[in-house]
Image: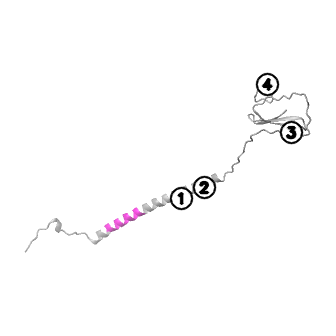
Amino acid sequence: MNYKKLGAYDSQSVNSNSQELSTAEKNTSCLHIRRKLILNILAGIAVILILLAIMFATTILIFENVDTQTIKPTTGRSININATTTWIQHATTLAGGREGGRRLNQLYNPDSVYVDDDDRSILIAEWENDRIVKW
């Protein structure tokens, strides 16, 4: 009888088919879980990007639809006086107190003057007091 010495390289695997299938199933299951996780992460990122795009587009539309009104300042002063107005030849017209202020008898940065010949009054618009005073 010839007996051979068996070394480490001469050994054969003794695994059964059932063990190989369970290992293959484990690998497949693990791979399946990884794929699901990656797909869920990608889906979450896609949802976030879509929401950001909607918010950005809505913000742009809101700011584009804002109505703005531009008021151009006048460069000169104009006074509208009726041509049939009669004037007293020698008189002094006083409006306001001695100093500028916020009281009813004071003016503070008067801006416009209108002479009303119907009731012989003067209307003065003040910029700083945000009012129109009738004298």
Q: Are marks 3 and 1 in contact (CB under 8 Å)?
A: no
Distance between the alpha carbons at the discs numbered 2 and 3: 52 Å
Q: Are marks 2 and 3 in contact (CB under 8 Å)?
A: no
Choose mark 4 or mark 3, whichever is in front.
3
Q: Earlier in the sequence, mark 4 or mark 1?
A: 1
Q: Residue at x 80, y 39 (%)?
A: 78
Q: Earlier in the sequence, mark 1 or mark 2?
A: 1
Residue 104, image x, y percentages: 80, 30
Q: Earlier in the sequence, mark 2 or mark 4?
A: 2
Residue 26: percent from the left, percent from the top?
Answer: 34, 65
What residue does disc 4 label?
98
| Label 2 sits on residue | 58
> Which one is closest to the eye, mark 4 or mark 1?
4
Which-is-in-front pick, marks 3 and 1?
A: 3
Q: Does dot 2 land on a helix, a strand or a loop?
A: helix
- Where's residue 83, x and y in %? 90, 40
Q: Amino acid at mark 4?
A: Arg
Q: Is residue 93 left or right of residue 126?
A: right
Q: Is residue 88 left or right of residue 110?
A: right
Disc 1 residue type (three-letter): Ile
Q: Label 3 belongs to which residue?
A: 81
In screen coordinates, is 2 left or right of 104? left
